[in-house]
Amino acid sequence: MSFSVTRFAQDSAFERYALDELAPAIIPSHGLQIIDYLEEHRTEPRIHASAGSATVKAVAAIGGRPATVDIAPLAFGMAWKILDLVVEPLLPPRADGQPQTIGAKVNSARTGNGPQRLKPFTGEVEIWKRLMRLYGNTMDLRHSIAHREIIIHDDGSLGATPGHEPAPLRPPSVMTADELGYFLRATQGFYTALLEEQLLSRQRKNLCFLLDQLTSHHDLGPLGGVEVRRNVLVLARPQLLPSGRFAFDAQPYLAYALNRFPNAGCDIHLYFPNGVVLGGHLEDAPTNRPCEIRLDYLPGWLNPIH
């Protein structure tokens, strides 16, 4: 058995739908800061804001009346199932052709760097290892929800209850309400990268931040991540070269944006003389040199804006 993005997307569709709504890895900010360099007569860019709409929260109802059910255990179970759907096809099946047991999958996830890494994590050993350890080390919470009893403390934390297995390697897991939020968001960021088969700079530093908040569960050190807390859009024009091509030096634009708005995710819209507008993540543009841009062969970090 091998991992299939298509099969994973199908098998995890409901859980992903719920987590996309409940716990996006990068929380959308209400509004957008715009840094506008299009007025070329100005010595400094014009900075203004675009208002955003507030999030509308769904209210569950049973029989027409508001429900008061705590969905924290359900949310945890959905996130853990997604991790399980990733790990399962990475292990060979049992002799009878059936998938490996949860115990075997957890042992693999806890051993060394975990099972075979998938794109785009093939070169991200430390991120992958922490995600696998999160899966393995929280198995007792999953078993408590599925087979025993989960403890929901007054402060919103979830506590595992002991089972009949041999003495565990770790004390029963207790996941605080804040940690649960980070766990859900880390899972959402993880599967989004798997489905898109890419981990852009913004998503990477935010995922590292989320994993840094879960060190007591993966038992590994911090990665030095940074949470993305707001959205910034830079409007600029590229430089026209004598060759007819264009160049854009991203470094000063990115440095200015992050100096004014730390921990921001920075998008760029580049306006060309013929009316073409290209956009992308400014963090993914080369910052060690100006980037030459051909409109007939775009760099990977830019796409047409429709």
Image: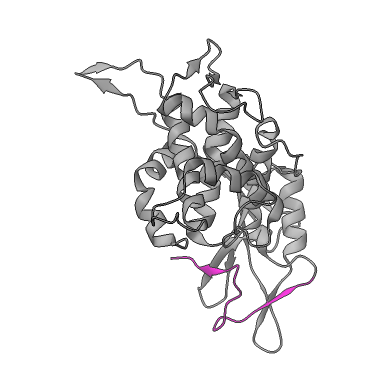
Along the line of sight, the residue nearer the viewer: 273 or 75: 75
Q: Position of residue 100 (x, y in %)?
A: 46, 49
Along the line of sight, the residue nearer the viewer: 64 or 56: 64
Answer with left or right where residue 226 lies relative to residue 142.
right
Q: Magenta residues: mostly which secondary structure?
A: loop
Q: Residue at x 43, y 37 (%)?
A: 78
Answer with left or right where residue 165 lies relative to residue 69.
right
- Determine which quarter of the picture holds residue 58: top left
Q: Position of residue 104 (x, y in %)?
A: 53, 45
Q: Say if 110 sits above or below 39 in the image.
A: above
Q: Is 196 inside the magenta-drawn segment? A: no
- Determine which quarter of the picture holds residue 180: top right
Q: Residue at x 64, y 68 (%)?
A: 237
Q: Residue at x 53, y 62 (%)?
A: 197
Observer able to see residue 48: no
Q: Say if 56 sits above or below 133 in the image.
A: above
Q: Residue at x 44, y 42 (%)?
A: 20
Residues shaded magenta = 289-306
Q: Is 297 inside the magenta-drawn segment? A: yes
Q: Say if 34 sits above or below 212 in the image.
A: below
Answer with left or right where residue 185 lies relative to residue 171.
left
Q: Position of residue 169 (x, y in %)?
A: 66, 31
Q: Position of residue 264 (x, y in %)?
A: 66, 45
